[in-house]
Amino acid sequence: AQTVTQSQPEMSVQEAETVTLSCTYDTSESDYYLFWYKQPPSRQMILVIRQEAYKQQNATENRFSVNFQKAAKSFSLKISDSQLGDAAMYFCAYRSVRDMRFGAGTRLTVKP
Amino acid sequence: EAGVVQSPRYKIIEKKQPVAFWCNPISGHNTLYWYLQNLGQGPELLIRYENEEAVDDSQLPKDRFSAERLKGVDSTLKIQPAELGDSAVYLCASSLGRSSGELFFGEGSRLTVL
């Protein structure tokens, strides 16, 4: 089974500043997708951003962007101009035909 | 368009009692997932359906857990009998295909076993 590793259990950022959450994964497949999901406290998980492995260009969604390094199997999430509403658990996820796996999550705190 | 609907949102039972969770995926989504999420951890796959077929149930504790997806639409996850360690959030998700696109999640069913 593929593994997804988030090495930062907790991160903190000052409001309006930038933070980067790390994710690495292990796979022998060439065709897959990577996602970052956000889960606010006691609320449902929602998609933040997705990246197709065959695309070299890094995905961007407003204040959220990724740094996808396919050879290094790294997929970090950058949040710019952090807002109080960004506080949540963030999960990195890997998806292929055979598998769908999540990392253990990073709890992001945003300080006013 | 309605999202993934799960019920009940919360359930408190005593150990050894049975419990069932229901999920209705987004219309047209062929793939349905049940995940277990412990507090402060990532979701762990219990079972994945492609239409009505369970294609990955390797992580489902089959001695006490069962699931069904009759007619390939809504699904039920059952635990019988429940144990203290089953206390967790049970998440249902659906997607259009089995290899692409994101998963859409329901709000989850939080189970507390006393």
Image (tube, helix red, strand yellow):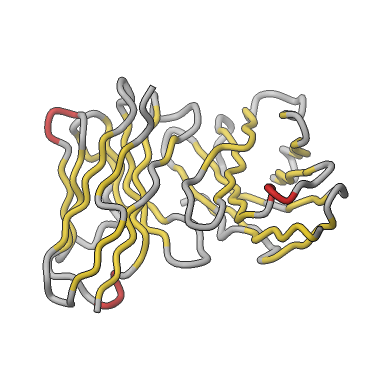
Quarter of the view holding residue A14: bottom right
The spot of residue B24 in percent (x, y) is 26, 35
Is A38 above or below relative to B53?
below
Q: Nearer the viewer, residue A32 or B40?
A: B40
Quadrant placement of the C terminus of chain B: bottom left
- The residue at the point 71 percent across, 44 percent down is A75
Q: Furthest residue to the front?
A: A112
Q: Where does residue B85 sit, x and y in percent of width and height?
A: 30, 75
Give B10 or B32, whichever is nearer the viewer: B10
Q: How many marks?
A: 0
Q: Residue furthest right?
A: A17
Location of the N terminus of chain B by quadrant is top left
Residue A89 in which image quadrant: bottom right
Q: Residue at x 26, y 57 (%)?
A: B60
Left or right side of A65 for A103: left
Q: Position of residue B17 (x, y in %)?
A: 12, 71
Look at 72% across and 46% down and name the residue there.
A74
Q: Quadrant of residue A103?
A: bottom right
Residue depicted at x 66% and y 66%: A9
Q: Is A14 on the left or on the right of B79, as rendered?
A: right
Rendered location of residue A54, percent (x, y): 65, 25
Left or right: where B20 falls relative to A67? left
